[in-house]
Amino acid sequence: MMTTAPIVLFVYNRPWHVQKTVEALQANFLAKESDLFIFSDGAKNGKDREAVNEVRGLIRGILAFRRLEIIESPVNKGLSSSIVAGVTSVITQYGKIIVLEDDMITSPYFLHFMNEALQAYETEEKVISVHGYSYPTKETLPETFFLRGADCWGWATWKRGWDLFEQDGAKLLSELAEQNLINRFDMNGTFPYTQMLRNQVAGKNDSWAIRWHASAFLASKLTLYPGKSLVRNIGIDSSGTHCSKSDCFDGPLSNLSIPVKGIEVIESELAFQAFRRFFQSAGKKDLKDQISGIFQSIARRVRLEKY
């Protein structure tokens, strides 16, 4: 029998996005067998207070889960501190976790995939996490595959994985350089992960996600991905600070269950090259502006510095 992992949802000041995220999550087949923890950050200023209160009113009425627990911060912690503290507290108690933010639309099969993978790879030390999103590449990807590092658009891990999270960005940056890993870390120069980490060290963003990815990458750990995405980000819509509108990362959600079958626990070179070509396509005129915008969003706000 499958034991479901607790779901942790982080919210702030976007009621429409929260409502859509929760509605999709409620439609998941394992929602009624799952505990939901919601961390609501406090308002950064008076301008945000009304929206924060509206979000809090919305989440207090959530049904369809086995148990609902809401943790409301009286002060503004910011996304990074909220996620690090929230994940740490829940995973310390339960040993595993599924993490979402307030702009993630999930397939009805998301929870099933995440829980099945958490169970299948619980004792596999090479695997640090599970991810629900997959880039809309032109190539057909394997049904499931591994990539080195970790990711942040609907993810899950175990305490043994989260214990590897290194908060010192400067240390991570130094180790990447010393081990001559920067080019590979940047998807062979096609995605600016290293620059995002440099910006975190310089105080230009407060990214937990880039440090999570770098921590896993340096430890040579792998993340399991679905070949078809089970998550769609609806937050890249100009609704938040520093976020430009873009749909280049949009792809159809899987309308079928994705089974977690036994595959070799190694990085998929096929998937790596498909992702690399996806980012490399930013040089094409039709995607240039969208990719440029998404880079800025990721580096400055989406997933990293939302608040």
Image (tube, rainbow, N blue to C red):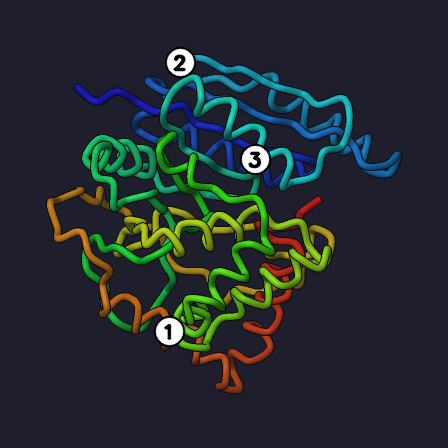
Task: Residue 190 in the image: state x and y as whole percent.
Answer: 46, 76
Q: Relative to 274, say whether 62 is above or below.
A: above
Of residues 26 and 140, the one nearer the viewer is 140
**Front tag of 2 and 1:** 1
Residue drawn at (53%, 50%), measured in percent from left and top? 211
Task: Residue 31 in the image: state x and y as whole percent.
Answer: 37, 24
Q: Name the residue under label 3.
A: 84
Q: Name the residue under label 1.
A: 276
Mark 1 and mark 3 lie on one chain; the one further toward the N terminus is 3
Task: Residue 307 in the image: state x and y as whole percent.
Answer: 71, 44
**Front tag of 1 and 3:** 3
Residue drawn at (54%, 15%), measured in percent from left and top? 69
Tag 2, which secondary structure? loop
Mark 2 and mark 3 lie on one chain; the one further toward the N terminus is 2
Q: Relative to 107, say whether 170 is above or below.
A: below
* Amino acid carrying mark 2 in the image: Arg
* Amino acid carrying mark 3 in the image: Val
Left or right: 297 in relation to 253: right
Tell me how far mark 2 sits from mark 3, CA to CA: 24 Å
Tell me how far mark 2 sits from mark 1, CA to CA: 40 Å
